[in-house]
Image: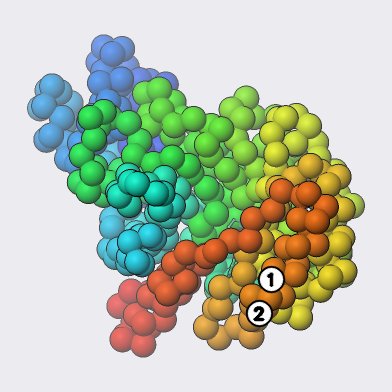
Amino acid sequence: MPASPAPSMKYAPAKPPLTGETLETLAARLGERGEPAFRARQILEWVYKKRARSWDGMTNLSKATRAWLADTFELMPAALVLNRQSADVTDKLLLELGDRSLIETVIIRAPQDGVGLDHSRKTICISTQVGCAMACVFCASGLAGLRRDLLAGEIVAQLLQVCYLEDARTPRARAELASFDNIVVMGMGEPLANYDALIRALAIVNAGWGLGFGARRITVSTSGLVPGILRLADEPLGFRLAVSLHGATDAVREKIMPVNRAYPLSRLLPAVKAFATRHGRMVTLEFILLADVNDSPDQAETLREIARDLHAHVNLIPYNTVEGLPWRRPSPERQEQFADVLRAARVSVTLRREKGHDIAAACGQLRLQTEKGAAQAGPDLD
Ligand code: SAH
């Protein structure tokens, strides 16, 4: 098992996605064609504010410009192939990319009193790689290893697809705004192993000419790549950080997360602290509860000390069973006992009432089922 991600296959489609271009890079391309400086802004307004679904829909561009765009870029590099809804609370989108790879994007709605679900707070969970190299033993995404990194434009496209769906569902007065409240980079893949594409995508999502989405509402979740955490701490846009801890001691953590061998807690925790100090915002520690693996009172007590030292929020997540893997979640009583150890010390903690269990919402599970199904049906998809 690689303790740090192996370099993945480079993917360079004949037509790169337009959603991977920044205002500057697009303006430079257009400038070479002798187009005026405002043209790039005009095109990006069609993409992000007016949500144009075709080149022909960009009616204030000349036919020649539209033809050049169509020859040069893919407008939407991720096609929606499946939307599985769960009790109206979760939408799990399966998207197909240009090379037929499948990725997942999830819409999670938090029901609120007095408003319909369409107006509830929405968190969008996006993927950054096809598969994953981190090989965490409990996770469906890593079972088949890493296939490739996503392009920045494929990361951005996931959010545009969500906008298309939400725009159709709930027409809003200011239709140009993003139709969700938070972004979590917690889908398939290790975001900090695809660092440059991640940052480029998030800069596009954040830019005024892009989706105009606040960096403070974007959380990047990592399995613990220390150099990436330190780099992220230095980014001018202040993204939030979540760390998948899942073990409060090296002995427990390295059993389930091979990354702990390269970056043990003695290196990880100071990096998280440096990030928190730099940003002055709480970091989140994610801790999935696995029966008989990491759910002992000892683990709870050690986690409590780590959280206090980092002044971190702890998100306890009862494990979501993956077909073919032996891991189970502890009983609800044992989950509560674990949480109580943290609560008693006034550590900020949530015990996640999990959403979307019935539609395989955890990381990589829908893709896995779809690919397994396709493999059984014949060699068509993969
Ligand atoms: N690679 C990044 C982000 C993607 S995983 C990371 O490790 O943080 C997002 C979160 O889902 C991680 O905390 C991961 O450990 C967790 N996860 C993976 N499989 C899960 C499962 N079956 N049930 C619950 N959480 C799971």
Q: Quadrant of the C terminus?
A: bottom left
Is the residue under label 2 in contact with that under label 1 (CB below 8 Å)? yes
User: Viewed as shown, does residue 237 lie left or right of 121?
Assistant: right
Indicate yes or no: mark 1 CB to ligand 1 under 8 Å: no
Please state which of residues 31 and 46 is positioned toward the viewer in this rendering. Answer: 46
Instruction: Specify the color scheme.
Output: rainbow
For ligand 1, the image quadrant comes to bottom right
Residue 171 in the image, given as x and y percentages of width and height: 20, 39
Instruction: List the residue tagged with mark 2.
Output: 331
Q: Residues within 10 Å of mark 1 (few under 14, many from 20)?
A: many
Please state which of residues 313 and 113 is positioned toward the viewer in this rendering. Answer: 113
- CA gap, disc 1 to disc 2? 6 Å
Q: Amino acid at mark 2?
A: Ser
Looking at the image, can residue 30 be seen?
Answer: no
Q: Amino acid at mark 1?
A: Gln
Which quadrant holds residue 23? top left
User: Viewed as shown, does residue 182 lie left or right of 293?
Assistant: left
Q: Quadrant of the N terminus?
A: bottom right
Q: Is residue 284 above or below residue 39?
A: below
Q: Is residue 44 above or below residue 224?
A: above
Label for residue 335?
Answer: 1
The residue depicted at 69 percent of the width and 34 percent of the height is: 281
The residue depicted at 13 percent of the width and 22 percent of the height is: 60
Indicate yes or no: mark 2 CB to ligand 1 under 8 Å: no
Please state which of residues 59 and 177 is positioned toward the viewer in this rendering. Answer: 177
Which quadrant holds residue 108? bottom left
Secondary structure state at the residue bearing disc 1: helix
